[in-house]
Every structure is written in structure tokens, then in C-alpha cells.
Amino acid sequence: MERTEDTIDIYSGTGAVLSWAYKLSSEERDRLWNSAYIEPDGFRRVLKRLEVAKGGVIALTGVQGAGKTEGLRRLFAIFSMLAWLRGNRTAPDVVLVRWQTSANQIQSLLNGDAEVFIPSPLHPDEPAKWFQAEYRARLQRELRKPRMLPLRLPEGREIPARPEDLDVRWAEGQVGSSTCEKIKEEVWLDVFAKKSLILIDLPDYSRSDRRLITRHLSEIYRLWDRLSRYSAPAIVIAIQKDLINRHFFFDKMEKIEISPLTSEELLRSYVGEFDGTYPFTEAALLKLAVLSRGIPRRFKRYAALVTEAWCEQGAQHEPINPEFVSKAVTEDRLIEDLEVEFEELFPRSPEHQRQAGRLLLRLSERGPTDQTNLAKDLHIKQYEMSRILAKLEGRYTRREGGAEGHRKIVHLLEL
């Protein structure tokens, strides 16, 4: 919905909730430390692993929206603060990188882009300043090296005594493009040198974009290979679960998955953010949590849809209840989101993805259901129903019964 001055008044009592819900990704938040963050099981495993062992590469996986980036930010904040408390305030030995290609990241640092790399929760612009200063200093040293041909210095000009006074463009013209690129690569490598923990946040990829995934992972592999020759940093890489095993580097990684949050955990995260459940009832928030299947990004998206509908209908005289949630978050929307989740289980069958989504919604509405009746109700052939349930078994559903004279009862697994 497009927000205009005519509609802004109806949102006045829910502005904080909508502002929170509209920021679907962790990168959109200004705060590095989120006090309302609920640590999922996978995050706790990574934290424990980093506390007891040094080195190694960890792939922090999960579906889109599960909280991989938020987990990296949490790790960064924890280990940066530990370094600060230990007195290492000028050079924390932890690095957080939102990965691009190396060339793009180098250029972003030279341009002063603080979003590329964050070494300190107190001074997020320091990496760009350090990178620029170090690049100038190395250019200056290169200019002062003995050479066969003298520098083409303009009349009255000398190489400045201080790197910050150096004319970078002129200096680059003197030393040549190949030397400049080599210096940039060396400074980029020094960003990671002597760090004990490197956190790398890979972007969300299209499943068809294999070339970019391969390029990014190959660059990270080369970085890891170079660093491992003289140090043994721990590297944690956040990456989509469905992309695991599409590159040889994954075989060298320890894989830890961020599991969905429980309904109670999502409720606690909301209450922790707003110190209450307004404008929802507690039952409505739990309903949202169930519909979101424990995915924090999906939970926020549904909270925005419901809150907008509540405002537009002028229903602010009473809190949002579960029935209102069911009307605002349509079945088509739920199935669309579930289809994305089921692409991993049914990669070649969009129809099975949709059928599995409808199946889960029906179980959430009606509770445990006879498998035969479930197939008839959803107009799915019995043999197809068996195939779908076999894929969902143990992760989304479970079946009991099936002995002679008894039909199988399908249950929806609780998060």
C-alpha cells in the first residue's frame, strides 16, 4: 500500500510497529545490537563452537529470512565487545563483511562506503578511512622506490612528506595501473590479516545465478587459502540453505543450520521489542507465529499486512485477534511463501510445492487428519499424497497408525 498524507493519520498509534515490520532485513536496522533478538539453536551452536575451538570454516545456513545476517551481527557485537573489554580497543580482531566481488568491495572502501565492512560498533566508518590512508601510504612508498626512469614531477612539486597530502590520481598515474591494483589487493588482504574471527554475509542469490555464487565462493576460498598460510582465523559464512553443496569449498566447511524459532520465541521477540503485545492479543501473535512457520522475516511481513488491514478498517477500538489475522493473511499469500520454502524438497514440481503448502495449511486449521480424507479434501491422488508426505515426514509432519484395520493419521509438527 502506498503511504500518503491522507492515510498517515490512521497509522499514528501503530507507527513503531509498522516501522519495525517494514524493515524486513537485518541490514535496514540502525542498531547493531538488538536486545529483543532470540538466539536460535543454530546460533548457540556456532557461538559455543567459536568459544571452545579456534580456526575452521563454518557455513551458517538457513532458509531466506531465518535470521542468518542477524546471527552474524550478533556474533560480531559479542566478539567486538569482548575485544574491547580485554583492552584491545584500537584493533578488534573480528571482521564483518557484507560480501561483494573483491573488486567492488575495494572500490567501495576507496569511495568511503561504510556498509561494506564494519570493524567496530563504535566507529563504523573506520575501515574506509583506514583503507584509504593505508592505500595512500603504500602509494607514497612506491613513489620513493629507486627506479630506472625518474618521476615526472611538475615544476616545483615534490613527493609530500605526509601520505594524506598525496594527490592520489597523480600518484596512480606515476606508478601504473597494474602496480595500483596489486597495492589495493595487498591492503584488502590486510583487512583480514591477524584477525581471529571473520564473518562473511553472502547476499541472497537467485537459484539460476550459479555464476555469481561460484565467483563469490571462489574468491572467499582464495582469501581463506592465503590467510591460512600464516594465521588460522575462524570464518563464519552465512549462506542460503538451498545453495549448500554447489561448490567444492563447502566440503571444507562445518555446516550449522539456523532452525526456525518456536511460536513462543517469536512472541517473546515481539514483546521484547515493544514491551507488550499491542496492537495484537497474545493469541493473535501466536497465530502469526504459526502461520510464519518460525521464520522471523515472514513473521514481520505478516504483522505488517495485518496491522495495515486493521488500521484501514478502523478497528482500533479493539486489539487484533486470531480471527482477524486469519482474514488478513490470505491462503494464497501463505501458499506463495510456503512454495518458496518447498523448492528444496520438490525442485522439479511446482504443483507438489503448492499441494504441500495447502496440506500444511489444512493441518494447521483442522489438526490431525486421516491421510485418506486429507487427500480427498485437497483433491490429491492417494499415491501423490504418499509421495508428498514422505518428503515432509520428520520435518513438517508425522504419521501414526497404519496397522491393519487402521488408517494413517497425519500430524503437523509443532515448531
Image (cartoon, helix red, strand yellow):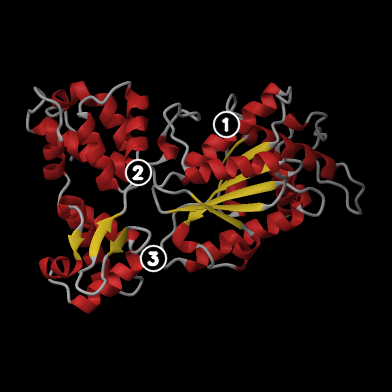
Image height of 395 relative to 313, above or below: below
Q: Quadrant of residue 127?
A: top right
Q: Earlier in the sequence, mark 2 or mark 3?
A: 2
Q: Nearer the viewer, residue 184 or 328?
A: 328
The amino acid at mark 1 is: Ala
Disc number lying in front (1 or 3): 3
Look at the image and tell me whether residue 110 can be seen: no
**At 21% from the left edge and 51% from the top edge, which residue is drawn?**
364
> Circle 1 sits on which residue?
77
Mark 1 residue element: helix
Residue 53: tell me if it is visible.
yes
Q: Which mark is residue 242?
A: none
Residue placed furthest toward the bottom: 383
Q: Reading the chain from its start, which is encountered first: label 2 or label 1?
A: 1
- Decide which of 82, 104 is in the foreground and name it: 82
Q: Which of disc 3 and disc 1 is earlier in sequence?
A: 1
Q: CA separation, marks 2 and 3? A: 19 Å
Mark carried by residue 344 = 3
161 is higher (above) or lower (below) than 197: above
Query: Which residue does the numbered mark 2 point to in the structure image?
Result: 297
- Amino acid type at image mark 3: Glu
Q: CA distance from mark 1 to mark 3?
A: 32 Å
- Residue occupying the point 8% across, 22% down: 317
Classify mark 1: residues with Cα within 10 Å, few (<14), some (14-19) or many (20+). many
- Kind of residue at disc 2: Arg
Q: Secondary structure at mark 2?
A: helix
Quadrant location of the N terminus in the rendered image: top left
Identify the image quadrant of residue 163: top right
Other residues around mark 2 within 10 Å, as few (<14) / some (14–19) / many (≥20)? many
